[in-house]
Image (tube, grey):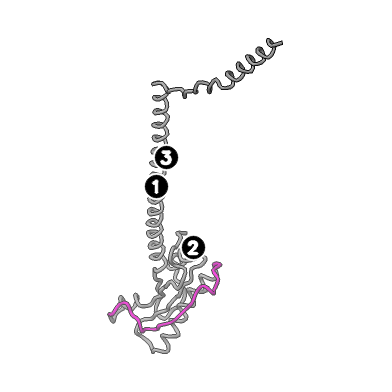
Amino acid sequence: MRRLPLLVLAGLAAAALAACGGSPPPQTAPQPNADSIAAAERAEADRRAREEADARAREEAERIARQRAADSLAAMGRTTEAVRTMLATMIHFDFDKSNIRPDDAGVLDQKISILQANPNLRIRISGHCDERGSDEYNLALGNRRATSAKQYVVSHGIDAGRIETVSYGEERPIAQGHDETAWAQNRRDEFEILSGGDALRHP
């Protein structure tokens, strides 16, 4: 009868020893070998190279965009100046006349094209005379000359509300002589931009 308890005790002792036998051996992290270190370094170098290439590409794209904008503004300035010059071209009249001469009709046709290409553009036409005749007569004649040019432009489809007229008679000569050469220059219509002339499109 004593054998059984001893066996039980022995079994319990063995179980206790097994339970207290200590923790399992620690798991050690695998150490990277030279190949994996080199691969990681190559991957990091590739990543940096891609980032640098992307940054350079962005800088180049921004530089090109800035250059194009500058070129566009410069071209716009040249275009606007050329259109302004065309628009400012004067037309002239025969003595005591207000009808549009055939050679000046072509000048007005250019102005019509400019007005069509720039719908926000508004202009003023001023009529002028030479020094002969009374002030009152020349004011009326200058008005007829400005109105004649306006009617020509309006008859070609331009809204009359975009064109103002004024007469200066003989008050603003551009040639100071007292002969036909000077008088021929002073019998004229001038064209002035009132609004919408900041960035003019070429027709």
- Earlier-in-chain disc, 1 versus 3: 3
- Earlier-in-chain disc, 1 versus 2: 1
| Residue closest to the eye, 33 or 114 | 33
Q: Mark 1 is on which residue type?
A: Ile
Residue found at x 38% / y 61%: 82
Q: Helix, strand, or loop for circle 3?
A: helix
In the displayed orientation, state which residue is furthest to the right.
1
Residue found at x 56% / y 67%: 157
Dot in front, 2 or 3: 3
Dot in front, 1 or 2: 1
Q: Helix, strand, or loop for circle 2?
A: helix
In the displayed orientation, state which residue is furthest to the left.
177
Q: Mark 3 is on which residue type?
A: Asp
Residue found at x 40% / y 64%: 86
Dot in front, 1 or 3: 3
Residue ID for mark 2: 113
The residue stretch that appears in magenta:
156-176
Magenta stretch: includes residue 98: no
Residue ID for mark 1: 64
Q: Describe residue 67's horizontal placement relative to residue 3 as left or right.
A: left
- Earlier-in-chain disc, 2 versus 3: 3
| Residue closest to the eye, 132 or 75 | 75
